[in-house]
Image (cartoon, rainbow, N blue to C red):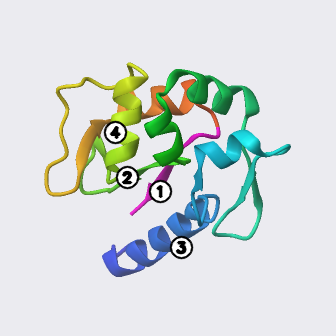
Amino acid sequence: MRFDESVLRRWMSLEMGKINDGVVSARVPLSLLLEMERPVATTRGGKEHVFDRGVIRKIGATLPLHLRSALKLPIVFYFDMEVSDSCMLADEVALAALQELGDLSIERRMENGKAWVGRALVFALLRKYPSAVQIMMG
């Protein structure tokens, strides 16, 4: 049996597209989510992404006003199959918010518009902040 890498890559691309359909298409400011009766956003696949009210209230209560108004949710980490142990964060405000929440070290800095975070930590953030953190496959 011959292994055809191009077929495998096409199949993986299709599967990643399905996974990415669940990612919110237009992130919503936390301050707006806190005002909504039912905090929701639309996914890339056209479905509703319902935010956990308890989670967004906890985040909102902890963050200072300038971060509460600047932060857009969900926080999106990018997973690249070429980097097996880390996910990339490309949102400086999200980095500052996670630092303020005590989830990332204040020593962590953006380099060239990116901050790399270990996958184990990203998965812990997904569990701690359900609906407020997502991973996008790249």
Left or right: where 36 falls relative to 43: right
* Residue 27 numbered tag: none
Left or right: where 31 falls relative to 9: right
> Do the CB atoms of the residues marked 2 and 1 lie less than 8 Å apart?
yes
> Do the CB atoms of the residues marked 2 and 3 lie less than 8 Å apart?
no
> Do the CB atoms of the residues marked 4 and 2 lie less than 8 Å apart?
no
Question: Mark 1, residues whose alpha carbon is within 10 Å: few (<14), some, or many (≥20)?
Answer: some
Question: Mark 2, residues whose alpha carbon is within 10 Å: few (<14), some, or many (≥20)?
Answer: some
Q: Disc 2 or 3, which lies upstream in sequence? A: 3
Instruction: Name which residue lies at 44% across and 78% down.
Output: 10
What secondary structure is the magenta-colored segment mainly? Answer: strand
> Do the CB atoms of the residues marked 4 and 1 lie less than 8 Å apart?
no
Q: Mark 1 points at which residue?
A: 136
Q: Disc 4 or 1, which lies upstream in sequence? A: 4
The quadrant of the rendering that contains the N terminus is bottom left
Q: Nearer the viewer, residue 109 or 81?
A: 109
Dot 1: element: strand
* Marks 4/3: CA–CA distance: 30 Å
Answer above or below: position of 101 versus 23.
Answer: above
Q: Which range of residues does the magenta coloring cover?
A: 131-138
Q: Nearer the viewer, residue 3 or 96?
A: 96
Q: Mark 3 points at which residue?
A: 14
Dot 3: element: helix
Q: Mark 2 points at which residue?
A: 79
Q: Disc 4 or 2, which lies upstream in sequence? A: 2
Q: Nearer the viewer, mark 4 or mark 3?
A: 4
* Residue 95 numbered tag: 4
Instruction: Name which residue lies at 77% across and 64% down.
Output: 47
